[in-house]
Image (spheres, rainbow, N blue to C red):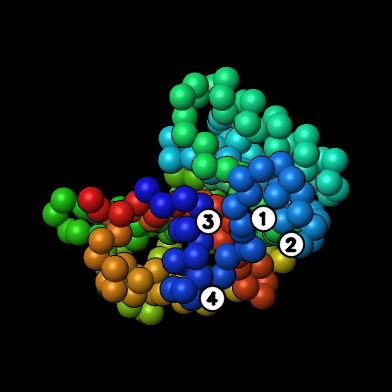
Amino acid sequence: MLSEVESKKLLEQAGIPVNDTRLARTKGEAVSLSREIGFPVALKIVSPDVVHKSDAGGVKVGLTNTAQVQKAYTEIIASVKEKLPGAIIEGISVQKMARPGVEIIIGVTEDDQFGPVIMFGLGGIWVEVIKDVVFRVVPVSAWDADEMVREIKGFAVLQGYRGQEAVDVSFLAKLITRISEFIEKNPRVKELDINPLIAYGDGAVAVDARIVMKP
Ligand code: ADP
Ligand code: MG
């Protein structure tokens, strides 16, 4: 399994916008990185043993100064050690906070029969409550990708509701095709998870990513 920092690096090369994310190995490093990146930042546990970082108390968002970064660093390490004793801790990722938008998930899994399959859907509470996702087998054409985006039950959410901005759906479709091309070029990728990608009227940014390679 690649770390969040490594996964985002690969995605960036594949043409998927990611937020600036760096690895800190000490509290001092977390502070200097957050100054370089610019507040507000988020801190997250980086561990091959932690898949759901929030559940382990491994995510702190919206940190606006160095004191908050220091406190978050200490709390994350303490919480992960308490909840998952023995977990290997590589460090803590320091990353730019993305402004609020519509949370999307894009995933790739390997199907025994069909090979790699791409999933697209609404993220955040939507995926947990109504499982609003659609699937296509790789390769996904531009036409298929456009159809995927329009097929979700919550398409109206992407078009803007209650004053919230409409997101750039053609850009989302483009990102799906870029993921498909990335998978075709990298057959060693077993699983890919972008959860969430935050979508806006003028683009989108992946703020959490996980790639698992085949042995
Ligand atoms: P995990 O899924 O492992 O619990 P995430 O990295 O997805 O951890 O963080 C949990 C939630 O925090 C995300 O779903 C998102 O809502 C929010 N979040 C995480 N990173 C950022 C960020 N850089 N900017 C804005 N919101 C973020
Ligand atoms: Mg996540």
The numbered mark at residue 95 is: 1
Secondary element under disc 2, as helix, strand or loop, is helix
Left or right of 24, for residue 130: left
- Alpha-carbon distance for marks 3 and 4? 23 Å
Residue holding disc 2: 37
Say which of 178 and 157 sits in front.
Answer: 178
Q: Is residue 147 visible?
A: no
x and y percentages locating residue 144 in the rendered image: 35, 73
User: For the residue with label 1, is its CB less than 8 Å from the closest atom of ligand 1?
Assistant: yes
Q: Earlier in the sequence, mark 1 or mark 3?
A: 3
| SS type, badge 1 | strand
Binning the other alpha carbons within 10 Å of mark 1 as few (below 14), some (14 to 19) or many (20 upward) gives many
**Residue most extreme to the left:** 113
| Residue designated by label 3 | 5
Q: Residue at x 79, y 46 (%)?
A: 63
Q: Earlier in the sequence, mark 4 or mark 2?
A: 2
**Residue drawn 59% across and 52% down?**
23
Residue 171, labelled with which disc? Answer: 4
Tell me which amino acid carries mark 4: Phe
Q: CA distance from mark 1 to mark 3?
A: 10 Å
Residue 109: image x %, image y %? 30, 53
* Residue 114 on image: x %, y %: 17, 58
